[in-house]
Amino acid sequence: MDFTLIAHRGYSFSAPENSFEAFDMALERGFNNFELDAQITKDGRLVVFHDQTVDRVTDGSGQVSDHTLEELRALKLIGGYEFERDFPDAYIMSLDEFLGRYVGRVHPHLELKSREAALPAMVAESLKRHGWLNVADTGTFDAPGITISSFWADQLYRSKLRLPNVRHGWLINELTEDTVDACVKLGFDSVYPRAGTATEESVGHAYDRGLTVRGWGIDNDDDMARIYRSGAGGTTVNWPDEAEAFLQTLDE
């Protein structure tokens, strides 16, 4: 099966998202491509966290940017699903911790989540500091490797200027000729449509323009079947084991 399943915020269906527990669980089960999110704390540190607020997945409240890293670490990370067991040691990690732990072992798909203009430069420095640019690759999902993504084209462009040899992918809702044209014009390597909107024609057009394609936003089996049959190279998913089993039924 030439299709990469990317553990979305780690194995986030079974462990708190963006935690070591979720990332380690994915790796132990054979999934070495991870998606994670980076944003800036009140004290100017990079933290691995998705939402703008901590309310949904912790026992705290308020904006991430209104907390220091130490304050974020003190919160209990509870995830987003009801898990079969408790994860009392799960906590909000810094990006440096993540990069130091997994260097040379995995392929992170690192999303620039927040809008601060300083974020791409800070991420680039952290990647350099931990040796990730030694495994930079713009053409494959192989591990080790590194991919930068964002919904914000300006953030992605800032990052691409600093890290020209790293693959950069634009997260979009729908793959159109206009979005493909914009990706090519801005020098991005990849385009990432919402899985439920992908078609074989639109994905093929993106490949013809020299872009690679993967999906996001898998909510059900129909989304998974659609992105798989579109010809895309992979997708993020919260439940990679179950997704792998489902895709095998499509090939039978």
Image (cartoon, helix red, strand yellow):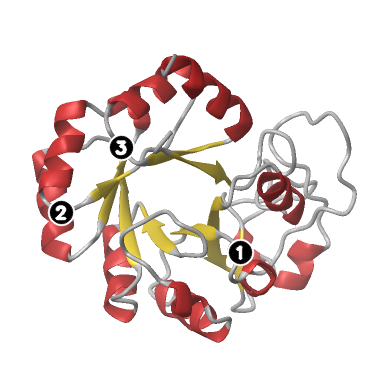
Mark 3 or mark 2: name the one nearer the start of the chain.
Answer: 2
Q: Say few, some or many: other residues with alpha carbon within 10 Å of mark 3 (under 14 / 14 to 19 / 20 or more).
A: many
Q: Say few, some or many: other residues with alpha carbon within 10 Å of mark 1 (under 14 / 14 to 19 / 20 or more).
A: few
Q: Say few, some or many: other residues with alpha carbon within 10 Å of mark 2 (under 14 / 14 to 19 / 20 or more).
A: some
Q: Which residue is mark 3?
A: 232
Residue at point 68%, 66% (across, down): 67
Q: Secondary structure at mark 1?
A: loop
The amino acid pointed to by label 2 is Gly
Q: CA distance from mark 3 to mark 2?
A: 13 Å
The amino acid pointed to by label 3 is Ala
Q: Is residue 176 left or right of residue 105?
A: left
List x then y, in percent, for residue 119: 45, 72
- Cβ atoms at labels 1 and 2 below 8 Å apart: no
Residue 2 vertical position relative to residue 135 in the rendered view, above or below? above
| Residue furthest front in the image | 252
Q: Which residue is mark 2?
A: 210
Residue at point 42%, 80% (across, down): 121
Residue 152 vertical position relative to residue 94 in the rendered view, above or below? above
Which image quarter holds the C terminus? top left
Q: Which residue is mark 1?
A: 105
Q: Secondary structure at mark 2?
A: loop
